[in-house]
Amino acid sequence: MKAFSINRHIVQRLGFSFLTLITTLTFVPVVWVILYIINKGAPAISWEFISGFPHDGMRAGGILPAIVGTIYLTLGTAIFSVPLGIGAAIYLSEYAADNTLTRLIRLAIINLAGIPSVVYGLFGLGLFVIFLNFGTSILAASLTLSIMTLPVIISTAEEALRSVPQAFRTVSISMGGTQWQTIRRIVLPEALPGIITGVILGLERAAGETAPILFTGAAFFLPRLPHSPFDATMALPYHLFVISTQVPEMPVQIQYGTALVLLTFVVIMNLTATFIRSRARAKRQW
Amino acid sequence: MPMVKISIQALSLQYADGTESLRGINLDIHANAITVLFGPAGGGKSSLLRCLNRLNDLTEVRTLAGRILVDGQDILDPKTDVIALRRKVGMVFARPVVLPFSIRGNLTYGLELAGERRKSRLDEAVETSLRQVALWDEVKDRLDDPAIALSGGQQQRLCLARVLALRPEVILLDEPTSGLDPISTGKVEASLQELKRNHTIILVPHSIQQAARVADYAAFFLQGELIEYAPGADLFTAPRDKRTGDYITGRFG
Ligand SMILES: Nc1ncnc2c1ncn2[C@@H]1O[C@H](COP(=O)(O)OP(=O)(O)OP(=O)(O)O)[C@@H](O)[C@H]1O
Ligand SMILES: [Mg+2]
């Protein structure tokens, strides 16, 4: 009996050690990548780099148009995908009957999330750039990124809505609330932190993508900032691709500096999401 | 004969999965009295309560037949204003569900849904309804604290007060004291005795003892049927149906 219980403790110990090791192993490459990029890119970072235009065939100067372009594209994506995504999630969670049509919609959303991003790029080229005649533009690229982002927003938002206790809805209805009043006053506010987290994660992915904007809105080089949604734009991920593969004799510093800026952009979004989530968890009243 | 507030006529309810939870119920509920619906689990007591303020609209129902007249109006009529009905016939559930607001927010919620914005009216409703459930003195200094911080007994009285703030005429209570200690239970029962002066109260008790304590009228339900209905004083001392007697004396399910 005694030996048996000691054995169990040893097994338990080994199990924990093994899991700790695995967790550490997944952590190492992430830290390594980040430190590597900071190390190589930090020397390039200066006010001029962030606020200036590229010159000398992009081998010198700053990356302002790419930074601004990525901000525009992210905002443009948000304008389309956030209301549409949250609306669809509300419909699926609160209104849709549990029937074949709803199941098909859910299936479509799941599959949409698995489509490679370059396919979205081709689709955007066909639909927005050519058929709808938006040209290679911020508008076409934002719409393409929106379609890519929608599944993420819809599924996280739907999950957040569903996690609001059913009893709140029953009580509200039993007090003479309409379904919409119940959603607006109880369900949405309670689900909001989860929804915002999903929105940010979705937009973060959009901000870092190259393939969907490649054919739809990304410019190789622009000596000025875009003036309208119908202009093409530079963007950080595409710029990084260009200066890493298309420009000979490119200073490595600028490449890593650009990567660092993009990384910072994404990390800030990620931290915001984490912050909102933990704040909401601390405040949760059920 | 006291006034009949609700007249239930040949009411039958079958859920979508085929369960017959109510079979031909005929029952007249008197105004300004406490009517107790009791009986073993699955008898259809909760189902009947949910019919009375159309909360069954949220569940899938296969057939719902018969009539429920509230003040002479058939509330099962599709033309019924369900929202108005639910304000007039309020419901308190077994487990206290406080909404994720402050104490005040819980109490003003129903009125705000109805479009009331005047602060004086809302404040007045908060105080009046809290006094009706003897909670005012306990919480008057922390009305803006989260309601979830209250004890279970206080939460359940808050839920009752929340319904009262809407000035309903009928109050439905489904085992409202099932999770409460005897002292909290006593407070709720005392509130009900006060409230019956101006309200019609229908209560599913959590025990036969409670049924006997509070019932002006008592209805015994067994497997979807109404077995016996009589003034509480009669039913609990001299039941006419053998099954009622067996259940009361504990020789039953
Ligand atoms: N939404 C539903 N769908 C299907 N069947 C249901 C539903 N709600 C209740 N029932 C069934 O209807 C019958 C009556 O249930 P009800 O909850 O009204 O009984 P009750 O008298 O309140 O019982 P308890 O004392 O356990 O609360 C039961 O057989 C129950 O399983
Ligand atoms: Mg019940």
Image (cartoon, rainbow, N blue to C red):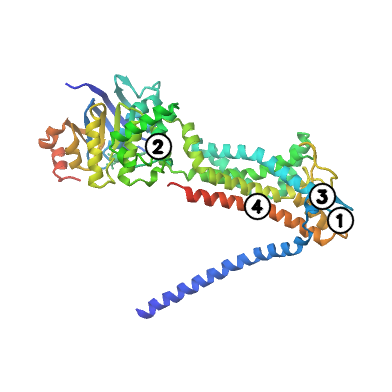
Give the vertical position of A209 relative to B112 (above or below): below
Q: CA distance from mark 4 to mark 1?
A: 27 Å
Q: Earlier in the sequence, mark 4 or mark 3?
A: 3
Q: Earlier in the sequence, mark 4 or mark 1?
A: 1
- The reply to whether dot 2 and dot 3 touch (C-beta < 8 Å) is no
> Given the image, what chain letter belongs to the residue carrying mark 4?
A
The residue that disc 2 covers is B104
Q: CA distance from mark 2 to mark 3?
A: 55 Å
Ligand 1 is found in which quarter of the picture? top left
Quarter of the image with the N terminus of chain B in it: top left
The residue that disc 3 covers is A52
Q: CA distance from mark 4 to mark 3?
A: 22 Å
Determine the secondary structure under disc 3.
loop
Q: CA distance from mark 3 to mark 1?
A: 13 Å
- The reply to whether dot 4 and dot 1 touch (C-beta < 8 Å) is no
Give the camera-side residue of B169 and A101. Answer: B169
Q: Nearer the viewer, mark 4 or mark 2?
A: 2
Q: Is mark 2 within 8 Å of ligand 2?
A: no
Which three-letter amino acid code belongs to the residue tagged 1? Arg
Determine the secondary structure under disc 4.
helix
Whether callout 1 and callout 2 share a subunit is answered no
Give the vertical position of A11 relative to B191 (above or below): below
Determine whether, in the image, residue A13 is placed left or right of residue B212. Answer: right
The residue that disc 4 covers is A268
Question: Label 3 neighbourhood size at 10 Å, few (<14), some (14-19), many (20+)?
Answer: some
Determine the secondary structure under disc 1.
loop
Residue A55: x, y in percent? 87, 51
Which three-letter amino acid code belongs to the residue tagged 3? Gly
Which three-letter amino acid code belongs to the residue tagged 2? Arg
